[in-house]
Image (cartoon, rainbow, N blue to C red):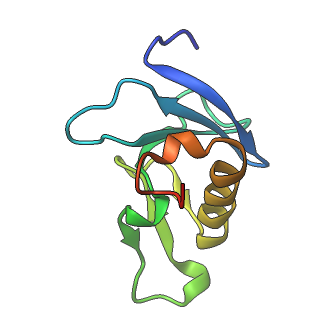
Amino acid sequence: MDRTDLKYIGGVERFDLWYRTEPTVMRPHALRIHVVGGKLNEWDIFQLPIRDNREINQSQAPDQRRICGNWGDVLLTHEEADLIDTYLRCFAPWVLGKGLTNE
């Protein structure tokens, strides 16, 4: 992928994480998440922090609920969202922006 507005910041078991280096007014802190081994177009944009994104299946049991990206192409379990959040806090806290970390 050759995009000057995206910076690869690593990933977790199932997802590669890309940070939007040129924030937009609507999404000042945005994370592009690609499914590892998925189809070429299997990615979505998430607002940071991850938990601020829309949740679907709210009436379902907790293990059926998902956090939805901008287009609904990637759906995260709450465990996956927590794993990504932990990864960002440990290895890329600068992507969380001012006020999203304790520093």
Q: Position of residue 44 (x, y in %)?
A: 46, 41
Tell which of 53 and 48 is nearer to you: 48
Residue 65: x percent and y percent? 51, 77
Residue at the image position 45 percent from the left and 57 percent from the top: 100
Query: Viewed as shown, does residue 80 lie left or right of 18?
Result: right
Q: Residue furthest left?
A: 25
- Residue at image coords 55%, 40%: 94
The quadrant the C terminus occupies is bottom right
Q: Nearer the viewer, residue 86 or 46?
A: 86
Quarter of the rendering containing residue 21: top left
Q: Can you tell which quarter of the image residue 68 is in?
A: bottom left
Q: With 48 as the anchor, is 16 left or right in this view?
A: right
Q: Residue at x 38, y 61 (%)?
A: 53
Residue 73 sits above or below residue 76 on the image: above
Q: Residue furthest front?
A: 103
Q: Is residue 94 above or below residue 8?
A: below
Where is residue 54? Give x, y as percent: 35, 65
